[in-house]
Image (cartoon, helix red, strand yellow):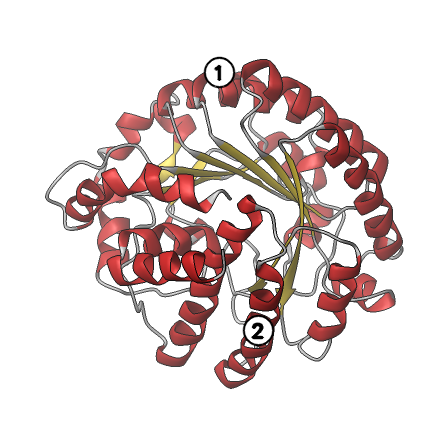
Amino acid sequence: MNSKDYILEIFPKTINYRLARRGLAKAVRPITLTFSVTGMCQSHCKTCNIGAHFQENPQKIKKLDMKIDEIERFFKSLGYCYFLNFSGGEPFLRNDLVEIVELALRYLKPRIIHTPTNAFMSERIEKTTRQILDTINKYDSNIPFTVKPSIDGIGEKHDEIRGLPGNFEKLKETIKRLKTVEKVYPNFNLELGTVVSNFNINALDEIEDWVHKQEVQSYRNEIAEQREEFFNIGEDITPSNEVYERLMKNFKEKVKSNLKNKKSLAKTTESMRLVYYDLVVKILREKKQVIPCYAGISNIHLNYDGDIWPCCVLGYAHSMGNIREFNYDYDKLYNTEKLKEVLKFIKDKKCYCPLANQSYSNMIIHIPSLWYMLKNFIKYR
């Protein structure tokens, strides 16, 4: 994410977002849309049961995926959003992912597009990435497109955690292929990401050292969470606050030592993440919302079956409504009592989590956190 532009985009809307959170105004459009484009996934991750859920109900899940005409109607109704974040399932399993991106460019006009991947379909990922970049560049070659393969361990450890034999070798091939894409498309960004869980807490140094050897500009980690989206509520996957704080102390020092060698985009993004890592430690320690959350206001999540969520953590249990029931009209959904109940639930701090995308928005709206981010950028530029 280009943190500097993101801050400039969201900051003028902060007053409206604050009023909307208190129920004193109708929120302007969200700045971030996360779209789980499919429920299909080949992985059987220890931290996520989406793949297992798909394998149990493959035909049912496939039928629930929103069709391209439905997606077009929703995008047209929603209108502009700054950051479009794809999710899944495995996004590259959709044969029409390029077409979805083109619809987004036509109606949402995003300034940043991002997608994660399990990196298993190396050739297809490279081919689709090139097609997406060609499509983006027909509209605006300044729009960055980021692909984030997951790395949760080295060698067999990665395959064990991801539940997909041969995944690490495919990951290496995917990185190699995507690095060739970087050489051709200036607006392409390759980054790697790790889910920090109880299954790899002793391997983070090894993972990070391996990542830096790949000369990848951006690397992030996010703590494993219990999410409704992942069907993993009640599972023992999240490290304790004490363990995570120790791990992040070491990780942050390495981030700082590498910041001056980063390109401008990566530098601003990493400066933002330094604040995020501190925020996660505080949330885990205090077990509450430590800064106000604007889920459902600044950010929304569109599930593959048409459900609109405030975030993937609350997901199915706190759906704000299904866009199919409202004829794909976002405004009709946004005026319902159900939505008001969900927003009140969040405002009353009945939930807390370190969800990264939502935390970034929350941090920018929260003046002390924003100041901390700016100080990091100035200090390490």
Give the class, few, some or many, for how many residues have Cα within 10 Å of label 2's Cα (few <14, many ≥20).
few
Badge 1 element: helix
For residue 249, the mark is: none
User: Left or right of 285: which side holds 20?
Assistant: left
Give the class, few, some or many, for how many residues have Cα within 10 Å of label 1's Cα (few <14, many ≥20).
some
Callout in the foreground (2, 1)? 2
- Report x, y in % for residue 19: 15, 45
Residue furthest out toward the bottom: 242
Q: Is residue 93 above or below residue 56?
A: above
In this rendering, does residue 162 appear at all? no
Q: Which residue is mark 2?
A: 253
Total number of numbered labels? 2
User: Left or right of 124: which side holds 246?
Assistant: left
Q: Is residue 113 above or below residue 352?
A: above
User: Left or right of 172: which side holds 209?
Assistant: left
Disc 2 marks a residue whose amino acid type is Glu
Whole-Å distance between the Cαs marked 2 and 1? Answer: 42 Å
In this rendering, does residue 205 appear at all? yes
Report the residue at 76% width, 33% height from top: 183
| Residue 138 in which image quadrant | top right
Report the residue at 55% width, 28% height from top: 66
- Report x, y in % for residue 374: 37, 56
Residue 173 versus residue 141: which sits nearer the camera? 141
Disc 1 marks a residue whose amino acid type is Arg
| Residue 33 in which image quadrant | top left
Q: Earlier in the sequence, mark 2 or mark 1?
A: 1
- Report x, y in % for residue 123: 85, 34
Tag 2 and tag 1, C-beta contact below 8 Å = no
Q: Which residue is mark 1?
A: 106
Badge 2 element: helix
Q: Is residue 223 above or below residue 198?
A: above
